[in-house]
């Protein structure tokens, strides 16, 4: 009879996500995860297949935190908007994990549930097959890209500066060379949720205009 499992999958996910939140990508190692769980590195190898397995733990943990709305009232656009915002909130809550979310795919069923929900909502536009895939890539790419832009884009405040300080810094750029960067710096609301919703509406308007039919 096999020995009982010492840790659950959820415990491993939670520990890996806490580790990357606190230590960053470089701190995500088998040894560090083992120490956090109070065990030896060889024990972790019974659960996780090396670095790739660690990364799957993190991406699965982030996606498992997506709080999809109960029910999806309204048309397909409203459903897409609600699910997309839920995914964005989960991703941006863990900025150190964003590179892994962009590049690592987990086959954990709970982690795949948000993607399935988004696809179901997009299918309400009448899309299927390659058209559905294209729409999914556009929306999911916007979600991840927007979260990443908050950290690394020209208006990002990774150093902890507030929006006013960023605007002032941008305003000091040569006006003739960077007029549009200065313009958007002054237009920045300091409200990521409002800006996310505004950008998503642009995408949904385009998807709606090219949809085979709408529900």
Image (cartoon, rainbow, N blue to C red):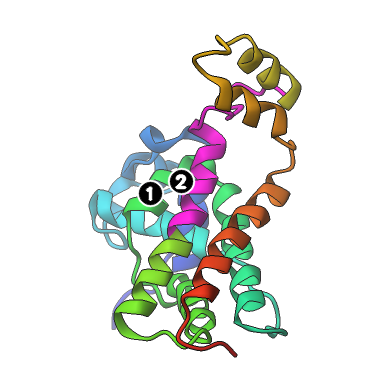
Q: Is residue 50 left or right of residue 143?
A: left
Q: Residue at position x 63%, y 55% from top?
A: 89
Contact check, label 1 and label 2, Cβ < 8 Å: yes
Q: Quadrant of the N terminus?
A: bottom left
Q: Which label belongs to residue 212?
A: none
For residue 36, above or below residue 130: above
Q: Residue at position x 46%, y 73% from top?
A: 115
User: Is residue 160 inside the magenta stretch?
Assistant: yes
For residue 117, above or below residue 100: below
User: Is residue 185 inside the magenta stretch?
Assistant: no
Q: Dot 2, how many residues are within 10 Å of its Cα: few (below 14), some (14-19), or many (20+)?
A: many
Q: Is residue 64 visible?
A: no
Q: Is residue 108 visible?
A: yes
Q: CA distance from mark 1 to mark 2?
A: 5 Å
Front residue of 134 and 102: 134
Front residue of 166 and 29: 166
Q: According to the image, label 1 marks what residue?
A: 100
Q: In the structure shown, which secondary structural element does the residue marked by tag 2 occupy?
A: helix
Q: How many marks?
A: 2
Q: Which label belongs to residue 97?
A: 2
User: x, y percentage for residue 49?
Assistant: 24, 58
Q: In the structure shown, which secondary structural element does the residue marked by tag 1 occupy?
A: helix
Q: Residue furthest front?
A: 176
């Amino acid at each position: 009879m096999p020995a009982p499992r010492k840790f659950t999958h959820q415990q491993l996910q939670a520990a890996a996500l806490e580790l990357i939140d606190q230590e960053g990508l470089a701190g995500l190692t088998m040894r560090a995860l083992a120490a956090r769980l109070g065990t030896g590195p060889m024990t972790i190898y019974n659960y996780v297949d090396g670095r790739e397995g660690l990364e799957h733990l993190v991406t699965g943990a982030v996606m498992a935190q997506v709080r999809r709305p109960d029910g999806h009232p309204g048309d397909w656009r409203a459903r897409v908007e609600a699910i997309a915002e839920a995914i964005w909130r989960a991703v941006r809550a863990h900025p150190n994990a964003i590179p892994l979310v962009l590049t690592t795919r987990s086959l954990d069923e709970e982690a795949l549930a948000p993607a399935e929900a988004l696809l179901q909502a997009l299918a309400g536009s009448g899309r299927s097959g390659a058209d559905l895939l294209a729409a999914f890539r556009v929306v999911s790419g916007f979600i991840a890209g927007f979260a990443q832009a908050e950290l690394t884009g020209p208006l990002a405040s990774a150093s902890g500066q507030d929006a006013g300080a960023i605007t002032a810094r941008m305003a000091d750029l040569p006006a003739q060379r960077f007029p549009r960067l200065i313009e958007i710096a002054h237009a920045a609301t300091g409200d990521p949720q409002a800006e996310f919703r505004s950008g998503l509406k642009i995408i949904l308007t385009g998807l709606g205009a090219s949809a085979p039919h709408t529900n």
